[in-house]
Image (cartoon, grey):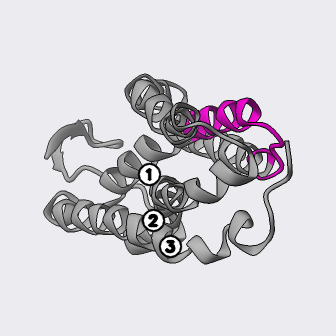
């Protein structure tokens, strides 16, 4: 609770903190944030199952395959905190939308990569977009839920993060290299 002066009388009154959820309510906000989080996490596990195909199609060495897989996660880990802080300053919605655009564009570009170097670069850019998305989804969920329900919202968010890893593995057959040959180098 916070104390604020009444607009007409000037007397101090106790008020509950407001929870900004818009028309959708806090469950609608959760429903909107979780798919973005699932895509971020699924991008790790889906690629892991695609690495053998990439090794053949792009003539990638073991060390190159490691970079293809780790460019995303290293970039995500390195930038998640700084980009979360930038989201706090510039607005989490703006950073979340920008991250979604960066992530989507880099994912599309990575699907057309014709060399290991190009794929590594686009995977790193995807990690940058993911680092903009992940903290924005969590901070939006915590801001949307009232304090007495916040634990439930964060637990649901965490469950969707775990589900993203499984969904990525299950979606493997739908990845480009499983459906068609990867573009030749």
Please provide percent x and percent y for residue 100.
64, 48
The residue where tag 2 is placed is: 34
Q: Which mark is residue 113?
A: none
Identify the main secondary structure in magenta. Answer: helix
The first of marks 2 and 1 along the sequence is 2
At x 45%, y 59%, the residue is 45
Please provide percent x and percent y for residue 104.
71, 51
Describe residue 47's horizontal placement relative to residue 179 as left or right: left
| Label 2 Cα neighbours within 10 Å, binned few <14 / some 14-19 / many ≥20 | many
124 within the magenta span: yes
Q: Which residues are magenta?
A: 109-129
The residue where tag 3 is placed is: 24
Q: Is residue 147 visible?
A: yes
Give me the C-alpha separation between circle 2 and circle 1. Answer: 7 Å
The residue where tag 1 is placed is: 137
Instruction: Tell me if label 2 and label 3 are in contact, CB under 8 Å.
Output: no
Describe residue 181's horizontal placement relative to residue 26 as left or right: right
Does residue 29 lie above or below 80 as drawn?
below
Give me the C-alpha separation between circle 1 and circle 3. Answer: 16 Å
């Amino acid at each position: 609770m916070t104390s604020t002066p009444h607009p007409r009388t000037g007397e101090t009154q106790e008020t509950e903190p407001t929870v900004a959820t818009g028309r959708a309510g806090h469950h609608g906000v959760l429903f909107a944030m979780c798919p973005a989080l699932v895509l971020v996490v699924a991008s790790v596990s889906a690629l892991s199952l695609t690495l053998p195909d990439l090794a053949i199609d792009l003539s990638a060495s073991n060390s190159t395959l490691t970079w293809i897989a780790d460019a995303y996660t290293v970039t995500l880990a390195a930038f998640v905190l700084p980009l979360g802080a930038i989201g706090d300053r510039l607005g989490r919605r703006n950073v979340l939308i920008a991250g979604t655009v960066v992530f989507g564009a880099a994912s599309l570009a990575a699907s057309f990569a014709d060399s290991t170097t190009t794929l590594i670069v686009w995977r790193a850019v995807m990690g940058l977009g993911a680092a903009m998305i992940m903290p924005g989804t969590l901070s939006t969920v915590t801001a949307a839920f009232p304090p007495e329900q916040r634990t439930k919202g964060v637990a649901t968010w965490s469950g969707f993060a775990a589900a993203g890893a499984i969904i990525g593995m299950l979606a493997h057959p739908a990845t480009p290299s499983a459906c068609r040959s990867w573009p030749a180098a």
